[in-house]
Amino acid sequence: MSYNYFLGCVIPGRLPFLEASARRTFEKIGMKVGDQAKCSCCPDPTGAAQLDHETFLALGARNLCLFEESNNNILSLCSGCTESLKTVKHLLDNDDEKKKEINLKLKSIGKSYKGNIQIKHFAEVLYENIEKIKKLVKKPLKDLKVAGHPGCHYLRPSEIINWDDPLNPKTLDELIEAIGADPVEYNLKNECCGNPLEKSDKEISLSMLENKLKSMREAGADCIACVCPACYQQFDFNQREINKKNNTDYKFPVFYITELIALALGIDTENLGLNFHRVKVNEVMQKIT
Amino acid sequence: MQMVDFEFRNELIKEDFSLNYCYQCGTCSSSCPVALITEGEYNPRKIIEQSLLGLKELLIKEQKPNVWLCCTCQMCVEECPQNVFLTEIFERIKNKIVLVGEPYPETFKSQAKSIIESGLAIPLTQPIIRRRNQLDLPEVESANIDEIKKLLTATDFEKKAKILEVNK
């Protein structure tokens, strides 16, 4: 079955350049991914999804129905969306009564959830194509020390995500290696970036971020690579906040893994929108060209 | 004095039976990054203990520990030797806080409002649409808002999340 993109809210509505890098990368590795019309918020597993369980299931199931109707699997560009959609699928596929209840709600909009499509995180699909990516590399990102940040919802809860090792993840680092860069080991690799707590306690959120940044710096990283737009925002938007607050000088360029892959595959930087990053990427660009 | 509310406890167990499996070893709290930063003020083990004891007032009204401080990283869920699905239980506690009308963080409310009004947590704005064009990205065909409204009416979301009060 072919894939359609599930874009989510953050990427198309705030960080469209990340979407550009993903689309260009999938094109380059020869994968045709379609667009799914009429999606809503997944809903956000760190936000609205926490308010009412029934609404979480109903909104998520409606999104799944759209893909069932168009007969496509889901290729999600965001870890949060992936977690929400996989959770809804897991809960409905394993509980007939719950499925019946939600289908009763979906009936009001003429839909019915069946459970016959798959959901994949984009990095999972990239990983399935890792050998192809290695072959397509035109400009290996030699000597670039990349701190990979897998993030939480890319991995956990593993019973539902059912993918990389939830406590000792490898896939992101292997993708970094595949494009000739050097994935650095750092102590807090598996820690949360703190983004979700921006909604309830900015102070704690920034402390979590600073701990990560410190650990990345100690490991000698040149830049950060992530696979989730929420993590991306936390790293790219909030280093300045940390610096203001604590008089530090963090300025790690932050990349979506698809941006780094796109660069290594020789995709024209004009099409990537790297100028929209808050932390400037110039130093890294000089290093790799 | 804290009153034990058996109904509250039984409801939570019904919603997620794994709550029953907890033997209070504290692995969750030792794996929790927020517990570490707040020096134990946020404490997942304690939330589970209070859930098992039915200490509703503490969890729902006083919000001690504050369940909204869970960063949803799911480390506790991975590390729990008893397979207690802590984050699921926390979600149900948050649901109850919202339902009875106790205060909850404004950002959650504004996101819910945005979803009700546009179907999206972050609606597309004109500057972003221009930027999308610049980047040669296709137009996003968003959800039909009447359809979203109908579905959210079926789940009674606006009323449950007390969204109308924001508008007043």
Image (cartoon, coloured by chain):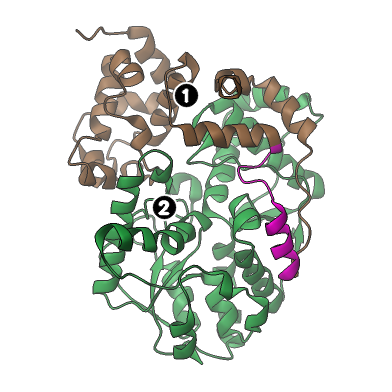
Q: Which residue is drawn at 64% across and 36% down?
A: B115
Q: Which mark is residue A216?
A: none
Classed neighbour count for the residue bearing mark 2: other residues with Cα under 10 Å, few (<14), some (14–19), many (≥20): many
| In the image, residue B37 above or below residue A53 | below
In the picture, which chain is green? A
Judge whether residue B63 is colored magenta. Answer: no
Comparing marks 2 and 1, which lies closer to the viewer?
A: 1
- Quadrant in the picture for the N terminus of chain A: bottom right
A93 or B35, which is in the foreground? B35
For the image, the number of numbered tags is 2
Q: In which quarter of the image is residue A186?
A: bottom left
Q: Residue at x 66, y 36 (%)?
A: A61
Q: Residue at x 62, y 73 (%)?
A: A273
Q: Quadrant of residue A55?
A: top right
Residue B41 placement, left or right of A121: left
| In the image, residue B7 above or below residue A134 | above
Kindly identify which chain the residue marked by label 1 belongs to.
B
Q: Residue B95 carries which label?
A: 1
A157 or A78, which is in the foreground? A78
Compute the Cα span from label 2 to label 1. 22 Å
Q: Which residue is drawn at 69% across and 51% down?
A: B125
Q: Can residue A106 be seen in this view?
A: yes
| Kind of residue at badge 2 | Cys
Please identify which colour was used for chain B in the image: brown
Q: Residue A152 carries which label?
A: 2
| Kind of residue at badge 1 | Asn
Q: Give the extent of the magenta segment.
A: B118-134
Q: Where is residue A151 in the image (x, y as percent from the top left)?
A: 42, 57
Q: Can residue A32 be seen in this view?
A: no
Residue B4 placement, left or right of B88: left
